[in-house]
């Protein structure tokens, strides 16, 4: 009788150990959650930046359930801005253009604290609304996009 109990207990232990050792780790399961901006403080919507010398700063915290990869930042003139809202006194028709910025990220969370994006506002350009687009990507190439409209004034 004692031998049966001992064999039963051993069998339960073997099955338990085998069951736990066969459990899949999170690395074995596909990543289906895109990264997120857990905080986003700057640039603020409708914020005004003036040339010359204006600086557009980025302040955000990016998080992912596994690992972050990159943050791409773009800026483009938004031609739907009515002339009456903001008008350049110089009559310039050329929008302010900048190359896309790519920030390499790592880990599951990263703080970007008042990092200047693009160069100082300089030269002559069309005043108005510009859309800043941020594309946050994780190591599984899942992405989240955020857009912010700001005012650039020459």
Image (cartoon, helix red, strand yellow):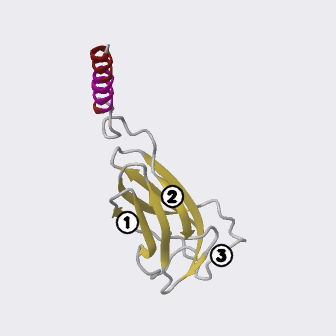
- Secondary structure beneath dot 1 equals loop
Q: Against 107, is 141 above or below?
A: above
Q: Position of residue 28 (x, y in %)?
A: 31, 35
Q: Tell me the crowding category of disc 1: few under 14, some 14 to 19, or many 20 or more residues within 10 angstroms, Cα based.
A: few
How far separated are the C-alphas under marks 3 and 2? 33 Å
Q: Which residue is mark 1?
A: 99
Helix, strand or loop for the magenta stretch, by majority: helix
Residue pictured at 62% horizontal, 67% vertical: 45
Q: Is residue 88 above or below residue 107?
A: below
* Residue at the front extreme, as displayed: 1
The secondary structure type at the circle numbered 3 is: loop
User: How many numbered markers are drawn?
Assistant: 3
Which residue occupies the foreground of this view, 72 or 29?
29
What residue is pinned by disc 2? 37
Q: Which residue is mark 3?
A: 87
Tag 1 and tag 3, C-beta contact below 8 Å: no
Identify the mark nearer the N-term, 3 or 2.
2
| Camera-nearest label, 1 or 3 | 1
Res 27 quadrant in image: top left
User: Mark 1 and mark 3: span between their CA atoms?
Assistant: 24 Å
Mark 1 or mark 3: name the one nearer the start of the chain. 3
Where residue 114 sits in the image (x, y, percent)? 47, 76
Look at the image and give the residue range highlighted in magenta. Answer: 10-20
Asked whether 80 falls inside the magenta stretch, the response is no
In the picture, which quadrant includes the C terminus?
bottom right
The residue lying at 43 percent from left, 55 percent from top is 136
Residue 13 covered by magenta stretch = yes
Quick check: marks 2 and 1 in contact, CB under 8 Å?
no
Q: Secondary structure at mark 2?
A: strand
Please, which residue is most extreme toward the bottom here? 52
Most extreme residue toward the right is: 84
- Give the left or right position of residue 88, taking residue 133 as reference: right
């Amino acid at each position: 009788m004692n031998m049966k109990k001992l064999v039963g207990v051993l069998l339960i232990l073997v099955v338990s150990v085998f069951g736990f050792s066969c459990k899949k780790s999170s690395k074995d399961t596909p990543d289906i959650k895109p990264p997120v901006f857990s905080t986003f403080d700057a640039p603020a919507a409708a914020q005004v930046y003036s040339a010359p010398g204006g600086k557009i700063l980025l302040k955000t915290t990016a998080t992912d359930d596994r690992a972050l990869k990159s943050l791409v930042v773009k800026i483009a003139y938004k031609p739907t801005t009515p002339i009456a809202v903001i008008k350049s006194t110089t009559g310039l028709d050329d929008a302010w253009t900048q190359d896309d910025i790519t920030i390499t990220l790592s880990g599951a969370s990263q703080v970007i604290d008042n990092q200047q994006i693009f160069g100082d506002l300089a030269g002559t350009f069309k005043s108005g609304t510009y859309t800043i687009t941020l594309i946050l990507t994780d190591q599984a190439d899942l992405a989240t996009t955020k857009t912010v409209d700001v005012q650039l004034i020459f």
